[in-house]
Image: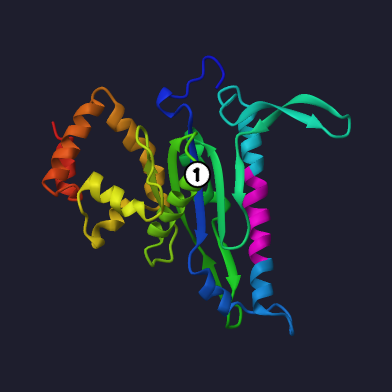
Amino acid sequence: LPAGSTIKEAVHNKMAVIHIDGNQFTKIRQRTRPETAGKHRLTTFAQKLRKQQQEKFLRPMIGWLTEQKETEREKGRVTRIINDHDLLEDKDQNVEALRFETLLWGGDEMVFVMPSWIALWWAQMFFDQWAKDWTMPVDGEGATETLTHAMGIIICDRRTPLRQARAMAEALCNAAKGGRATDALQIEVFESVDPPDSAAGLEGYRNLRYTAHKEEEASHFTLTPPDLQTLPTLIKTLEDEETGLPKSQVYRHLHSLRDRNELFHTKTIESVFEP
C-alpha cells in the first residue's frame, strides 16, 4: 500500500477469496424454455446466463473498479504497479494493474481474489446492482425464474495457500445456501489464526470457537443483502468511543456467552452492549 494510506493496519496483507454459486441452477436449467424449435434447453440456459454474467456483472464490475482508482481517496486501494513484459516492443515496463484475480469464471460458480479492504464493498455491489434481477425463461408462456446466488467470503493472510482459502470459501458458500433460493452469504475472518486445512474443517472450527452449535442455529452465520448494508453501521457502533467497547471486552463477553452456550441467543448478545 502507498505511504499515508488510510486503510486500517488490521487488514494490511490480508486477502479475500470469494466463492459464488447459483442457487438451484440445476433445477432451473431443467425447466428452461428453448428460445427456438430444435434448440436444446441447456444451450438456452447457458447462453442467457453467460449474457447476463458478461453484460450485467463483468463489464460494470470492471468499470467500477477502474472508476475507483481515479479518485484520490482510493489511490492504491484497488490498483498496484507491476512489472510486465510488452510482447510487441519486447521490453519490460511498469504498468498499473487492478488488485483483482479471477480463479473460476462462468457457469454456476465463480471464484475471485481481491484485497480484504474492498471485499464487503464489492459483495454489496454484487447483490445490490450487478447480479440483481437476473432471470431465466422457464416452462409456461412468458414465465421467468429469478436467479439468485450464495456467496462465501474468507478473509485471511495473503500467504495462505490458495487451495486452502478456496476450500474454505466454497464451504462458506455451501453453508450460506442452506437449501434456500435467496441471495445470501457467509463470512469468516481469520485475523491471527490459520484457516482449517479443508472444507470439512469449517464445522470443527466453528464448534471449537463458538461451542457446539445446533443445526437450526446455523442460520445465525448467514447474512442477506440487507444485513450487508447495515454491517458497516454496526461496526462503527462497536468502534465508537461512546457506544462501543474495547475489543478485549467484546471478546471477553462473547467468550462468556460461548461458555454458557448462549452465544446465539440474541437477547443475551444485546446485553453485552447495555450500559
Split into 4 quadrants, where in the image is the C terminus? top left
Q: Where residue 20 sits: x, y (%)? A: 51, 55
Residue at position x 51%, y 19% in the image: 5
Q: Dividing the picture into quarters, in which one does residue 2 lie? A: top right
Split into 4 quadrants, where in the image is the N terminus? top right
Of residue 47 and residue 107, the one placed in the foreground of this image is 107
Q: Does 109 lie within the magenta span?
A: no
Residue at position x 14%, y 49% in the image: 261
Q: Where residue 216 sits: x, y (%)? A: 24, 62
Q: Where residue 252 sits: x, y (%)? A: 17, 33
* Residue 258 shown left or right of residue 168 in the figure: left
* Residue 1 shown left or right of residue 51 in the figure: left
Q: Where residue 218 sits: x, y (%)? A: 28, 57
Residue 205 visible here: yes
Q: Residue furthest right?
A: 89
Residue at position x 65%, y 78% in the image: 41
Residue 184 visible here: no
Which residue does the numbered mark 1 point to in the structure image?
Answer: 17
* Residue 88 shown left or right of residue 167 in the figure: right
Q: Residue furthest top?
A: 4
- The span picked out in magenta is 48-61
Of residue 102 and residue 180, the one placed in the foreground of this image is 102
Q: Dividing the picture into quarters, in which one does residue 114 lie? A: top right
User: Label 1: how many residues lie within 10 Å, few (<14), some (14-19) or many (20+)?
Assistant: many
Residue at position x 61%, y 32% in the image: 68
